[in-house]
Image (spheres, rainbow, N blue to C red):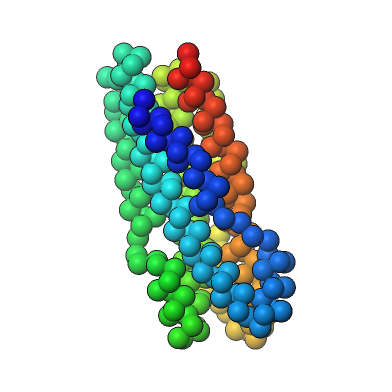
Amino acid sequence: MESMVALEADFRQRVATDWKTEFITAFLLSLVTCGIYGIYILYKLMDRRLQHFERMVSLRGHLVEVLREKAAQSGRAAEVEQDISQLEGIHMEATTRDRAGEKSPVLWLVLTLVFSPVAYYVYYFLNDDFRAHEANEKLFLSKASEVMMKLGISRQPIAPTTEIPERNFITFLLLTIVTCGIYAIYWWYTLINDPNLHFDDHAAWEAQLYSVLSGNTAQ
C-alpha cells in the first residue's frame, strides 16, 4: 500500500524533526558565549516545533488513508466509515491549530533580536502550542485506536503516556519580572524539557503503532 509506505516515511522522519537538547548544556554554553548560543537555541526550539507539527500533519493524514484502505480490504468499510470520517475531522481541526498563525522561526528570531521583549511572546506560543498539539494528538489517537480495534488491527488502545504541564504565561511573566529575570531560567528549562518528554513519548507510541500496522500488513 502506498499510504503505508508514506506513513513509514513519516515514522523515519522523527529522527530529523524531533530534535532534542539538554537544558544544562544549552544554559552553560549560552553563558560561555555571552548569550550567542542562546540565540541559536531559541531558533532551534521554534524550528523543532514547526518541523514536528508538520510531520504530524503528514503522519495523521497518512494514518487515516491506511485505515481506510485496511477497512476496504477487510470488507468492513461501511461499518467504520463514520468513525474514519470523524477521525479525519479531528485531523483537520488539529492541523488548523498546528498551523495557526505565522510562526516562522527566522521571522520571530529577527523580531526578538530587534526588540528583546518579543522573546516572551515566543516563550508563550512555544509552551501553549505544544500543550494544544498534545491534547489534539491524544484525541486523534484515541479515535484511531477505536477504529483499529474495530478492524481487529489492535487489541488495545495506543495512546501517549506523558502530559505537558500547563504553564500560565501571566504567572511566568510576572515571576520573571519580580525576580529580575532569574525565573526566566526556569522558563527556558520548560521550553526545552517539555517537548523533549513529548518526543520521548512519541518514540514509544510511534513504535507501537508501526508494529501493529506492519504486523497486520504481513498477515
For the N terminus, the image quarter is top left
Q: Residue at x 60, y 38 (%)?
A: 204
Query: Please, is residue 58 above or below residue 3 in the view?
Result: below
Query: Please, is residue 68 above or below residue 206 in the view?
Result: above
Question: How many discs appear?
Answer: 0
In the rendered structure, the answer to whether residue 189 lies left or right of residue 76 reads right
Instruction: Tell me where residue 58 sits by quadrant.
Output: top left
Q: Residue at x 71, y 79 (%)?
A: 32
Q: Position of residue 23 (x, y in %)?
A: 68, 65
Q: Position of residue 19 (x, y in %)?
A: 57, 55
The foreground one among 91 and 107 is 107
Q: Residue at x 51, y 31 (%)?
A: 209
In this rendering, does residue 101 appear at all? yes
Q: Residue at x 45, y 55 (%)?
A: 51
The foreground one among 65 and 96 is 65
Q: Position of residue 78 (x, y in %)?
A: 27, 19
In the rendered structure, the answer to whether residue 160 lies left or right of residue 144 reads right
Query: Please, is residue 45 above or below residue 62 in the view?
Result: below
The foreground one among 115 and 83 is 115
In this rendering, does residue 121 appear at all? no
In the rendered structure, the answer to whether residue 81 lies left or right of residue 58 reads left
Instruction: Tell me where residue 71 sits by quadrant.
Output: top left
Query: Please, is residue 67 above or below residue 219 in the view?
Result: below
The foreground one among 174 and 34 is 34
In the rendered structure, the answer to whether residue 6 lies left or right of residue 219 reads left
Q: Position of residue 115 (x, y in %)?
A: 46, 86
